């Protein structure tokens, strides 16, 4: 299933020019129980690609980094950082992936993720799979 944003399918062509990432909610029915997860995802990931022998030979300053950065779209195949959702996806469970909002800076992305997690009480409600917020606030058992 593809990403949905405001009820419509969302792909690489829909990314705003200055967009950095988005806040999402994933919902699924696992073992007869409805579950959800709220998180954030960057539109692109920077991947270090080692420079070839020819490119290294052309560099005049030997102190320069020995790799180039390649930017690749990273969100289309993404199914959460949550282990339960990943396993459910591999097992063929249908997961609804919705974009709640698009963010235009890394700080806004983190702030909005935390805001939505507190707003939805992800640590207090059983249906949310979020185990913590920012690695500082944890779900009680």
Image: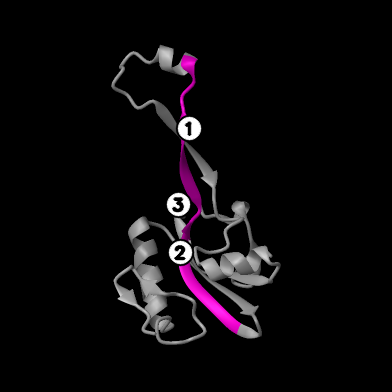
Task: Bin the neighbour count of mark 3 within 10 Å (Cα to Cα): few under 14, some 14-19, many 20 and up.
Answer: few
From the viewer's perspective, tell me whether residue 138 is left or right of residue 26.
left
Find disc 1 in the rendering and name its residue: 49
Find disc 2 in the rendering and name its residue: 40
Q: Quadrant of residue 27?
A: bottom right
Q: Which residues are magenta?
A: 34-53
Find disc 3 in the rendering and name its residue: 18
In magenta stretch: residue 39: yes
Q: Secondary structure at mark 2?
A: strand
Given the current orientation, which residue lies at the most extreme front position?
141
Q: Quadrant of the N terminus?
A: bottom right
Residue at point 40%, 86% (across, down):
124
Task: Bin the neighbour count of mark 2 within 10 Å (Cα to Cα): few under 14, some 14-19, many 20 and up.
Answer: many
Residue 7 percent across, percent down from the top left: 64, 72
| Circle 3 or circle 1, nearest the eye | 1
In magenta stretch: residue 64: no
Going from N to C along the chain, the mark reached first, 3 or 1, is 3
Q: How many numbered marks have been drawn onto this rendered protein structure?
A: 3
Q: Is residue 114 above or below residue 106?
A: below
Residue 55 percent across, percent down from the top left: 46, 17
Callout 2–callout 3 Cβ contact below 8 Å: no
Residue at point 52%, 84% (across, down):
127
Find the distance from the CA under tag 3 to the CA under tag 1. 24 Å
Callout 1–callout 2 Cβ contact below 8 Å: no
Find the distance from the CA under tag 2 to the CA under tag 3. 17 Å
Going from N to C along the chain, the mark reached first, 1 or 2, is 2
| Circle 1 or circle 2, nearest the eye | 1
| Circle 2 or circle 3, nearest the eye | 2
In this orientation, which residue lies closer to the viewer: 50 or 104? 50
Q: Secondary structure at mark 3?
A: loop
Q: Quadrant of the C terminus?
A: bottom left
């Amino acid at each position: 299933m593809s990403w949905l944003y405001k009820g419509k399918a969302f792909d690489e062509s829909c990314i705003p020019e200055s967009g950095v990432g988005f806040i999402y909610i994933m919902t699924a029915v696992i073992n007869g129980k409805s579950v959800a997860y709220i998180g954030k995802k960057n539109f692109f990931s920077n991947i270090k690609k080692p420079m070839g022998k020819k490119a290294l030979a052309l560099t005049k300053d030997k102190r320069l980094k020995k790799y180039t950065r390649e930017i690749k779209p990273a969100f289309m195949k993404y199914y959460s950082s949550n282990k339960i959702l990943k396993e459910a996806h591999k097992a063929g469970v249908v997961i609804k992936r919705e974009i709640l909002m698009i963010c235009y800076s890394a700080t806004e992305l983190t702030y909005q993720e935390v805001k939505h997690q507190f707003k939805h009480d992800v640590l207090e409600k059983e249906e949310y799979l979020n185990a913590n917020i920012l690695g500082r606030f944890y779900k009680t058992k």
